[in-house]
Image (cartoon, rainbow, N blue to C red):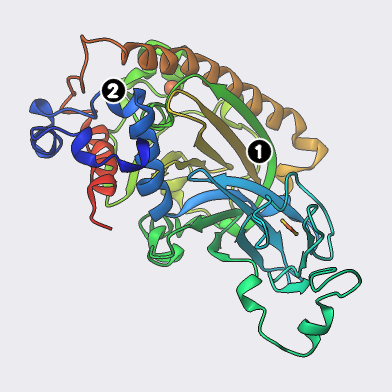
Amino acid sequence: MTSQSTPADFFDDTLGARLNSPTAEGSALPNVAYTSDAFYALEQETVFRKTWVFAAFLHQFENPGDMIPVEIAGRPVVLVKGEHGLIRAFHNVCRHRGAKLVNETKTSCKSFVCPNHSWSYSLEGKLLARPHFFGGEQHDIRNVQSGEDCHRADLLEIRCETWLDWIFVNLDGNAVALADYVAPISTRLQGYALSELRFGDSLEFDINANWKLAIENFIEPYHVFSCHPWLNSFVGMAEREAPTFEDHVLMCGYEFQHTDPARGEGLPYFPDLPEESKNRGEWFVLFPNFAFQIFPDQLDVFIATPKGVRQCRETIALYFVGEGAHSEEFAEGRNTVVQNWHDLNNEDIGIIERMQAGRASDGFDGGVLSPYWDPVLQHFARLVYEAMSAEK
Ligand code: FES
Ligand SMILES: [Fe+2]
């Protein structure tokens, strides 16, 4: 029974040592982390319930009353924009008989209305009415107006905070403030006028592989010379820096010597960008599954959403600077960037799915790590291991 699994069911005594030893002697996670439904269930309960997890984009919410249902750690969650523009998250379930409240994206709603017995709730989650609750034509509106206690039937709110265009939720409510969680990234991006970013386009890919393989592939540049001919010609292996990490953030970067249409040549740069950032690309993973790259003229988000132990969905969202995002003048430049992301991702997906297939083999169990390129992968494994092993 999956809910009774413990980390000891998956992690043998030596794994902690391998994850903490010098990288050349260490390893990443064992196969079971990519193949076991029980491991997946425990990972959802721990990693995805305890951390800040990306839920939706702010730009998806135009008007008060816009609602988007999502699933986080296997739980139905609904995000809603309130009257004053604040985004709230609630457990997406009616307090009466437990029907899922919102099944699809809705716009400009005045309230939540459950289709089962028409209980309604305000956009702030307060119970508004229970029709016929006290018998035929005996509605509960009277009860609410009299101020009698029916709060126990209000929707249950989930911690929800926003950073730029990205809405995160924390199901267990115990994570540090989102601003503190993203601080290792935000402090490194102070030279970028991030408020100038405008959403441009997005791509989605369904992948037959565990979400961790997509994130690991995103952060490690070792495969570039072999898998990505264009990317290798843009910045060769000798000029690439090894990825590093700080706490729950993984990071990497490089300097490029020349621009390229596929990387956004001609698109407007962030205003007042420091000289040293004008020929740099940086990328980050915010544990567990939210990542992005930033260049002088764009920011490209990459999210690997778990869809089962052997499936994930990659969402890529591309942001450009100011006019660069929408003006006709830059349409061709944007299209070339989008096409390049499409092509690069297709080059990656085949490899990611092969790594998934390889994890069914008895000939692999955590791998052999490059002491130069792979300390970041050992650290990612540690983050998963530690989040799953923590007491609470
Ligand atoms: S289950 Fe929602 S009103 Fe009854
Ligand atoms: Fe790649």
Q: Earlier in the sequence, mark 1 or mark 2?
A: 2
The total of numbered circles placed on residues is 2
Q: Which residue is mark 2?
A: 238
Q: Please tell me whether residue 293 is drawn above or below residue 84 in the rendered image.
A: above
Q: Crowding near pointer 1: few (<14 within 10 Å), some, many (20+)?
A: many
Residue 42 sits in quarter: top left
Q: Nearer the viewer, residue 15 or 179?
A: 15
- Looking at this rendering, what residue extends furthest in the right direction? 137
Q: Position of residue 343 (x, y in %)?
A: 58, 17
Q: Crowding near pointer 2: few (<14 within 10 Å), some, many (20+)?
A: few
Location of the N terminus by quadrant is top left
Residue name at image x 49 percent, y 25 percent: 311
Q: Please tell me whether residue 155 is drawn above or below residue 288 in the rendered image.
A: below
**Does the beta carbon at disc 2 come under 8 Å from ligand 2?**
no
Location of the C terminus by quadrant is bottom left
Q: Is residue 49 left or right of residue 262?
A: left
Q: State which image quarter holds ligand 2.
A: top left
- Looking at this rendering, what residue extends furthest in the front direction? 135
Q: Which residue is mark 1?
A: 267
Helix, strand or loop at label 2? It is helix
Instruction: Give the residue type at disc 2.
Output: Ala
Q: Position of residue 245 (x, y in %)?
A: 27, 45
Residue 318 sits in quarter: top right
Q: Please tell me whether residue 66 is drawn above or below residue 83 in the rendered image.
A: above
Residue name at image x 58 percent, y 42 percent: 298
Instruction: Give the residue type at disc 1.
Output: Leu
Helix, strand or loop at label 1? It is loop
Residue name at image x 74 percent, y 54 percent: 67
